[in-house]
C-alpha cells in the first residue's frame, strides 16, 4: 500500500473510532446506522487486504533468495571442475557452453539463471564418470539436479505471488474507492444533518476526516493529494 492510501486507512480508522464513541448522536437515525455499518464492513475488508498484500510475497522471496544462493554456489563449484576438465581434454564445446561469468548465476534474471544452471547440470550428468577425478562426486551432481529442478518451481511460485499481490492491489484500490464514496455521498452529508444538535461531534468528525501526509500537511475530503 502506498503512503497516500496508508494515510487514508488511518483516516478511516479515526472516523470509525469517533463514530463508535459517539453512537448516541446518530443511533436514532437509521440511514446513518446503515451507512456506518457498510463503512465499518468495508474498512474491515480493507484491513484484511492490506495484511494479505504485506505477507503475500515476503516469505516467498526469502525462500527464493536462499535457494538461489545455495544452488548458485553449488553450480559454481561444479562448473569450475567442468572448465578444468574441458581445458585438460581440449573440449572446446564444453568450454564454450560454460563461458559465462559465475556472477550471472546469482544476479541475472530468473530465466537466464535457470538456463545457465541447467547447462552446468546437464554437462555434469554427461561427464559424471570423470568428474570424480576433479573433486565432484555423484552426490554433488544429484544434489545439483534436484536443486535446479526445485529452483525452477520456486521461481514459478514467486511469479504467482507477484501476480496475486497485483490482484490484491487492485482490490485495495476498488475498496478505497467504495469507502470514499460511502463517506462523501452518505456519512459526510448525514453528519451535516446532525450538526445543529451535535455540533461538537460534527466538528470532531470533520477533523477526523482530514488526511495527514508524510510532510505533516492536512488535506480535507476532496483535496488533491500531496505531490
Image (spheres, helix red, strand yellow):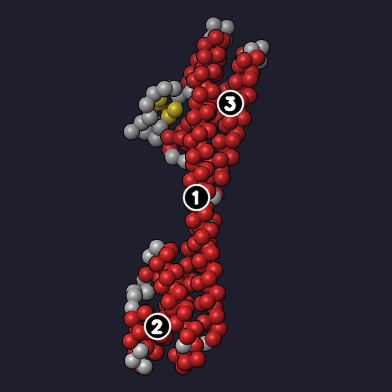
Q: Residue at x 43, y 77 (%)?
A: 119
Viewer-closest of 157 and 210: 157
Q: Taking 15 as reference, is 58 above or below it?
A: below
Q: Is residue 12 in view?
A: yes
Q: Nearer the viewer, mark 2 or mark 1?
A: 1
Q: Which residue is mark 2?
A: 80
Please tell me which of labels 2 and 1 falls first in the chain: 2
Q: Residue at x 60, y 28 (%)?
A: 40
Q: Which residue is mark 1?
A: 163
Q: Taking 129 as reference, is 28 above or below it?
A: above
Residue sticking out furthest to the top? 196
Where's residue 178, x and y in %? 52, 28
Where's residue 22, x and y in %? 61, 18
Q: Taking 35 as reference, is 177 above or below it?
A: below
Where's residue 7, x and y in %? 46, 33
Label 1 CA crowd tier, 10 Å (few <14, some 14–19, many 20+):
some
Q: Which residue is mark 3?
A: 39
- Say which quadrant the C terminus sits in: top left
Residue sticking out furthest to the front? 93
Secondary structure, mark 1, is helix
Q: Contact (CB < 8 A) between labels 3 and 2?
A: no
Q: Contact (CB < 8 A) between labels 1 and 3?
A: no
**Quarter occupied by residue 77:** bottom left
Amino acid at each position: 500500500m502506498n503512503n497516500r492510501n496508508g494515510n487514508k486507512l488511518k483516516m478511516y480508522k479515526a472516523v470509525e473510532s469517533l463514530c463508535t464513541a459517539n453512537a448516541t448522536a446518530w443511533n436514532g437515525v437509521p440511514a446513518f446506522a446503515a451507512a456506518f455499518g457498510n463503512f465499518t464492513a468495508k474498512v474491515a475488508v480493507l484491513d484484511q487486504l492490506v495484511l494479505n498484500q504485506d505477507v503475500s510475497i515476503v516469505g516467498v522471496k526469502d525462500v527464493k533468495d536462499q535457494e538461489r544462493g545455495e544452488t548458485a554456489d553449488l553450480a559454481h563449484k561444479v562448473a569450475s571442475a567442468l572448465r578444468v576438465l574441458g581445458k585438460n581434454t581440449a573440449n572446446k564445446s564444453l568450454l564454450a557452453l560454460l563461458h559465462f561469468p559465475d556472477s550471472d548465476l546469482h544476479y541475472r534474471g530468473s530465466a537466464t539463471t535457470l538456463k545457465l544452471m541447467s547447462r552446468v547440470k546437464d554437462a555434469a550428468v554427461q561427464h559424471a564418470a570423470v568428474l570424480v577425478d576433479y573433486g565432484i562426486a555423484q552426490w554433488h551432481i544429484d544434489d545439483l539436479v534436484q536443486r535446479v529442478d526445485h529452483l525452477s518451481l520456486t521461481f514459478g511460485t514467486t511469479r504467482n505471488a507477484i501476480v496475486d499481490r497485483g490482484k490484491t492491489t487492485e482490490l485495495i484500490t476498488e475498496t478505497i474507492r467504495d469507502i470514499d464514496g460511502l463517506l462523501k455521498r452518505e456519512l459526510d452529508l448525514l453528519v451535516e444533518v446532525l450538526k445543529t444538535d451535535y455540533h461538537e461531534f460534527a466538528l470532531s468528525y470533520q477533523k477526523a476526516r482530514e488526511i495527514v501526509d508524510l510532510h505533516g500537511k492536512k488535506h480535507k475530503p476532496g483535496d488533491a493529494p500531496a505531490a
